[in-house]
Image (cartoon, rainbow, N blue to C red):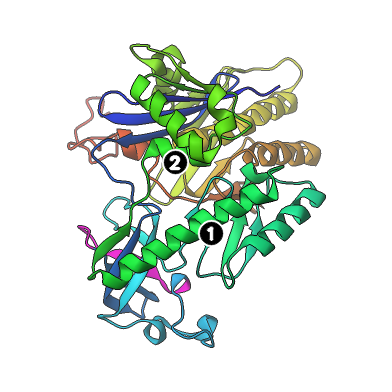
Amino acid sequence: MLKREIIVSTRDNATRVALLENRVPMEVYIEPDEEICLVGSIFKGVVENVLPGIEAAFVNVGLDRNAFLYVNDVLPQSARADQSAAGIRDLLHPGQEVIVQVAKDPLGNKGPRVTMRVNLPGHYTVLMPTVNHVGISRRIEDESERERLREVVHRARPEGMGAIVRTAARGIAAEVLADDIRELEKLWRDIQKREAGAAAPSLLYRECGLLPRIIRDLFTEEIERLVLDSFTSYARSLTILDTVNPQLKSRVFWEDKPDIFEAYNVNQEINKALQRKTWLRCGGYLIFDQAEALTVIDVNTGRFTGRVDLEDTVYKTNLEAAVEIARQLRLRNLGGIIIIDFIDMSHEEHRNRVLEVLGEEIKKDRRRTHIMGLTRLGLVELTRKKVHPSLAELLLTNCPQCGGTGKIQGQRKDWA
């Protein structure tokens, strides 16, 4: 039986959240108190530059750096416009005012990525005011329940708007889902009113802080406990749940510990996740080499020598590696292209089983992830949606001496 808990620390001028499964940290979220959350925030911006060479535009939304708007994220001015055949110059022009929502945080020297396809998340549904489409969470697998939810949302959504049914909506009554959609529609109408009287660039809607987002997005019936180290945050959580899901209030606990992350072994796992090498229980290990848009993971047998033969040793190492890699992707919050170099296996059934295990573990990830399969060189290629900076990008700073390479210029003393 999988026991899932959420641990929240709101001390040391930051909010830190850890998702635990059977007391093992799986995901970590960190948000300093002085930082505002950009992802999900909605701005009224002004198009500064239109660049047909990259089919994108840069939008001034009032931040330090202009936001990046790709052509596929632009809403056509006319419903009759064929966006698939339109270039960025056909859709936008400098000086044009647009409503955009931040889809990705600023990363490195890049500004935030934005979209004109706004979505407003609630506890059970996500309202899409600009898209006429109904979607159901892929984690809801029962076909009869999917059909029920689809019919409920079709009836409850505002005309011309779309909605996505979240996993938390499974088994929820129709009137509760309708109330959730009505609240989101009201929020959208309020944003439109602000936009009508606001000068560009300006902020129209700011996404809530980390604690309310975690309660809204992560704290569902599948979570056994929500544990906080601050009574103020504990009381705030109960207040939020009054409107989100009062039935979950009995699962909220306050534990006055000096360092709740230390008490639940989260700090130790964070420190391990910041290392290049991660050891497997069998004695093998993983090597993570992270670039801006690409991460390479190498699997090694290490100290594990096995008891049968080489193929069995390799197979068992790869199986354990597949499970741990899926966890590390979530814990380290790695995104972009992921290349995994499993140890070569002779038997096809072994290769298929390792891929199957990797796929089963990836399904537990809330972030959209696609396994592309084996390359011709025997490497496993997958992509994971990148929204926020990785754990290393949040907590580590490049060395000013080596620039992040881990190497410095010097002469070897052992020249022949």
The type of residue carrying mark 2 is Arg
Bin the neighbour count of mark 1 within 10 Å (Cα to Cα): few under 14, some 14-19, many 20 and up.
many
Q: Is residue 126 above or below residue 403?
A: below
Name the secondary structure under disc 2: helix
- The magenta span reads 62-72
Q: Is residue 180 above or below residue 83?
A: above
Q: Is residue 153 magenta?
A: no
Q: Is residue 377 visible?
A: no
The type of residue carrying mark 1 is Leu
Q: Position of residue 137 (x, y in %)?
A: 65, 50
Q: Which residue is mark 1?
A: 127
Q: Position of residue 296 (x, y in %)?
A: 49, 43
Q: Position of residue 249 (x, y in %)?
A: 53, 27
Q: Nearer the viewer, residue 242 or 279?
A: 242
Where does the N terminus fall, quadrant-wise? top right
Bin the neighbour count of mark 2 within 10 Å (Cα to Cα): few under 14, some 14-19, many 20 and up.
some
Label annotation for residue 213? 2
Name the secondary structure under disc 1: strand
Locate residue 274 relative to residue 223 in the image: left or right: left
Quadrant position of residue 260: top left
Q: Is residue 131 visible?
A: yes
Q: Position of residue 362 (x, y in %)?
A: 63, 40
Q: Nearer the viewer, residue 345 or 194?
A: 194
- Determine the residue positioned at 64% across, 61% down: 156
